[in-house]
Amino acid sequence: MSWSAASFDWNQARAFLATAEHGSLSAAARELGQTQPTLGRQVAALEEDLGVALFDRAGRGLILTDAGRELLMHVRDMAEAAARIPLTASGQSQALRGTVSITASDIFSTLLLPPIIADLARSAPEIDIELIAANELRDLSRREADIALRHVRPTEPHLTARLLGEGLGYFYAAPAYLARRGTPETPADLKDHDLVGFLDADQMVAQLTHFGIEVPAENIRYRSDSGLAMWEMVRQGLGIGLMSADMGLRSPDVDLLFPRHPAFRYPIWLVTHRELHSARRMRLVFDHLAEALTAHIARTHARFPAA
């Protein structure tokens, strides 16, 4: 397979990459903000230029051919290199102005970060903050965010991370639910109760089993991919739900169950791209978040000494 520099078209390569990663032209078109016919023409033009088929058409989906898989590795490397250009440039900026984007779960974005950002605004008023509330991981290498608050340790070599501490999670229920169904005395009693959880019930069952709590999947009767929506269903008395201690402390209308036994613990990592970490405004925001969140974690643990 040959591809001369003179004939290189990054739009075609980007169209191919998006299609390969999403498995369909329609999904790739939505990702790139293009129409499906336009994207299809770019992929077809790339196949014609290379003289090979990059996809096998299978119903509405697309499957990479051997040539497509080989090309995909190179195009991904190109995309990573292209993403590093603005990263490197941003990393050299020493100005305390500009935009910094932060991504975190919807719970943390709503509960923890706004007051921390407000405090930052008083000391660095020329830095604009873009807060991305998303429960899925954003790709920092592609500038989907500058700084991320995560509950899993990053493995990518170009990212730098700081472990801020450990969060606590407990079971909670609304008084209306407990009045209707009774109050469980131990975690083992949850097998006889309705639960509110995330969309993947089997995954939640596996996580609870890991912590020694046996709950049938059919007991997880109410589910959402949003932590805020899930919590609201708990507050409405639909069932017992897992939630971070931070949210529980701010919700006097729900009851904490089994206060001496955290249902789960989770690490809290602050992550950024290595090149961005050297930029003055990025470093300022990163360090401000780290200091404020570390103090918050310590205060939360002080409220639950048995944990």
Image (tube, rainbow, N blue to C red):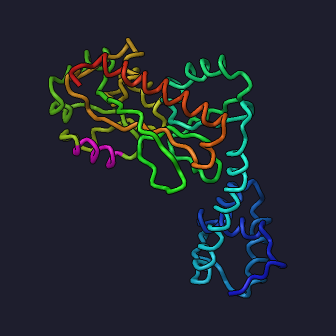
How many numbered circles does the render carry?
A: 0
Could you tell me residue 148's position as x and y percent?
A: 54, 40
> What residue span does the magenta drawing correspond to?
201-210
Taking the spot 67% from the left edge, 62% from the top edge, the residue there is 81
Question: Is residue 157 one of those drawn in magenta?
Answer: no
Q: Nearer the viewer, residue 283 or 76?
A: 283
Q: Nearer the viewer, residue 185 or 245?
A: 245
Quarter of the rendering containing residue 120: top right
Which is the main secondary structure of the residues drawn in magenta? helix
Q: Is residue 135 left or right of residue 217?
A: right
Q: Is residue 30 above or below residue 100?
A: below
Q: Is residue 69 above or below residue 94?
A: below
Which residue of the protein is positioned furthest toward the top in this rendering? 252
Observer able to see residue 47 = yes
Q: Which residue is at a point 63% across and 73% down the rendered structure image?
A: 74
Which image quarter is the N terminus in? Answer: bottom right
